[in-house]
Amino acid sequence: MASTIRGDALALPKVQCPNHPEALLVEDYRAGDMICPECGLVVGDRVIDVGSEWRTFSNDKAAKDPSRVGDAQNPLLNGGDLSTMISKGTGSASFDEFGNSKYQNRRTMSSSDRAMLNAFKEITNMSDRINLPRNIIDRTNNLFKQVYEQKSLKGRSNDAIASACLYIACRQEGVPRTFKEICAVSRISKKEIGRCFKLILKALETSVDLITTGDFMSRFCSNLGLPKQVQMAATYIARKAVELDLVPGRSPISVAAAAIYMASQASAEKKTQKEIGDIAGVADVTIRQSYRLIYPRAADLFPPDFKFDTPVDKLPQL
């Protein structure tokens, strides 16, 4: 039995047991019934199961997916990817007397859809390798579709465009990755990704926020296994160094690496330049150059409540 809850402007139907309105109904998927657990009353029947149909009538037990409902709709492809593809027959009933296949595809996937589908798979693979969430994959797919349909980057490989779109999507979603991190999970050089990045921003007339040292600090410190106190100190050091204009012209990544090195050397959890460089993707010499710029003002850079294991005057002079 269905009762109606009336609001000020909208009436929403609610299925509930008339004898036990507060009881949580149990759904019998086989029979399609909604049953009250208190008294057993069938409150609703013929409930539609919106899940996958997992029955299979195939003798092939090694099939990857026994579902017969097809792939999910992809709104990024023309026609929503709702076309049916008929595979090649294997039995004698699949061919006529001349050996021609009786059942053929009336519509094959277009070359543009095939190219986009391959790019979407590559984007998903790259994102999985660096543990990026679904919302970034979706934004990357949308960016790639816009660029592909504009045909503004003709001559560039789809893999390079996909890698640049992934870099832009990370920046736009507030979880930026470095060019080297994107380069590590793709087959494209850093130089080519950088070129496509600039061309895409110009073609789509979009922009990305400037990256800061704080965008990378928590991830770098976490990968290095540094405690929260060192991470907070490194974040404070990097922010103060930028505010005091001690590192003009230096990239945020190199400043963050130098700040982590200084904070770790002042704590009990000391890390070498090579360890930090491997995680941050910068060379040892780059860390040393940035460290030398902030070392003279080291006493002014640490937070007031920082507990020193090594005093400021005992920090390494590179």
Image (tube, rainbow, N blue to C red):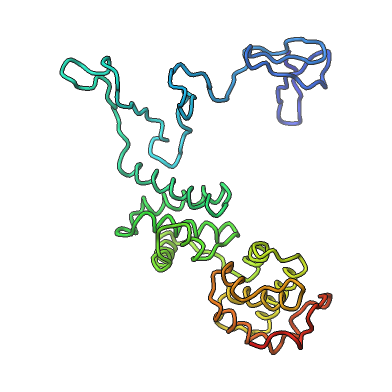
Indicate the quadrant containing the C terminus: top left, top right, bottom left or bottom right.
bottom right
Which quarter of the figure has residue 277?
Answer: bottom right
Q: On the rendered structure, is 215 left or right of 144?
A: right
Above-or-below relation of 110 to 292: above
| Residue 171: % across, % down | 55, 61
Question: How many numbered discs, if any?
Answer: 0
Which image quarter is the N terminus in?
Answer: top right
Outermost residue toward the left? 98
Please give the name of the residue rendered at 57% of the width and 62% of the height, measured from the top-left corner. 176
Q: Nearer the viewer, residue 170 or 233?
A: 233
Q: Is residue 22 left or right of residue 241?
A: right
Residue at 40%, 40% in the rendered image: 77
Q: Is residue 186 above or below residue 44?
A: below
Front-lying residue, 263 or 145: 263
Residue 165, compared with residue 8, is above or below; it is below
86 or 98: which is nearer to us?
98
Q: Is residue 291 left or right of residue 75?
A: right
Q: Position of residue 58 (x, y in %)?
A: 43, 18
| Rendered location of residue 189, percent (x, y) | 40, 65
**Quarter location, residue 219:** bottom right
Please provide percent x and percent y for residue 52. Answer: 54, 25
Residue at 27% across, 25% down: 104
Q: Which image quadrant is residue 267 in?
A: bottom right
